[in-house]
Image: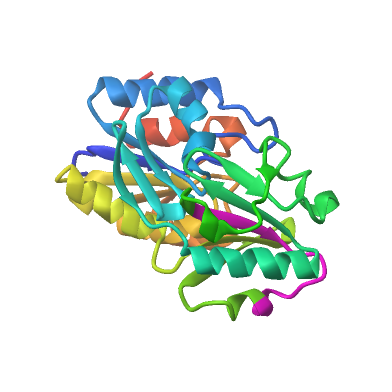
Amino acid sequence: MVGIRIVFFDLDGTVVDNLTEQVPESTVRSIAKLQEKKIQVVLATGRSYYLAKPVGDMLGVSNYINFSGAYIRLQDHEMYKDPILPQDLEQLRRISQLRGDHLSCFGIEESFSNGLAADIALPILKNIDCQAIPDMFTEREVEYMGMCLFLDRGQIEEYRQISGDLQFYHWGGDYPNAYNIERLGNNKARAVERVMAHFDIEPGEAMAFGDGGNDIEMLQTVGTGIAMGNASDRLKEQADFVTRSVDQDGIEYALKYYGLIGD
């Protein structure tokens, strides 16, 4: 196979074990070996930058795709950002307040929450320290790149009608009422293309790991797409290879299978 020069890793359910909320030691070792071989490593996640950075720091990684592609930071320099428009933020805030739905809003370095429907949202967002949501987004200079919406009484169609500039990603699985919201046109695949162009890397020289629906396009964009053993069936169908689960050293297993690292 063509020599791999860059590997993209989804975070939750891929690098981080969702059950233990820890990074397996085998994954830490494997990523260190990739970097020793001068292979670029990028964390590609729906998380905000400040929530992904502690994992990156622990792994020695400084390349990030955040908010599922709305923000890219490479080697401590911002490369791309596409925040949600203030008027759309205000409409989301207003409707969620009226409907009693939980809305969390994520900037690059901070987050806010309206505190509603806490019994639905807080068990999922338990590690996120959200300040009280501001009354008017238009009065703040902070840029918000992504949002999490947890429906209690509202319907998602009410939110879709706010603007044609927004896109809604349904979490699926165990979270039927949960959605990520970003600005239309951003996704991991487009972000991966931007990063490959920056490093002058061809798709055939790239590999990606993922476990969820928002990883499908990313795996299709690179030459070698790898689904975790705990991945959704949809993703497995699109992958070039299905490795073991995150808690069964899946990343290490796949990297050894493709000869990128040794024992």
Outermost residue to the right: 119
Q: Left or right: 237 with respect to 196? A: right
Render colour scheme: rainbow
Q: Left or right: 11 with respect to 194? A: right
State the image coordinates of residue 7 (x, y, percent, origin top left): 33, 39
Q: Is residue 15 visible?
A: no
State the image coordinates of residue 35 (x, y, percent, origin top left): 30, 24
Identify the residue at horizontal 37%, vertical 28% (top origin): 61
Outermost residue to the left: 200
Point out the image quarter for the N terminus: top left
**Relative depth, front residue between 215 and 260:** 215
Identify the residue at horizontal 75%, vertical 64% (top origin): 97
**Relative depth, front residue between 258 and 82:** 82
Asked whether 155 falls inside the magenta stretch, the response is yes
Q: Which residues are magenta?
A: 145-158
The count of marks equals: 0
Identify the residue at horizontal 35%, vertical 30% (top origin): 62
Where 180 sits versus 106, above or below? below
Q: Left or right: 137 with respect to 60? A: right
Where 171 sits versus 28, above or below? below
Q: Is residue 256 visible?
A: yes
State the image coordinates of residue 100 (x, y, percent, origin top left): 80, 64
Identify the residue at horizontal 37%, vertical 42% (top origin): 8
Where 43 sits versus 188, above or below? above
Asked whether 104 falls inside the magenta stretch, the response is no
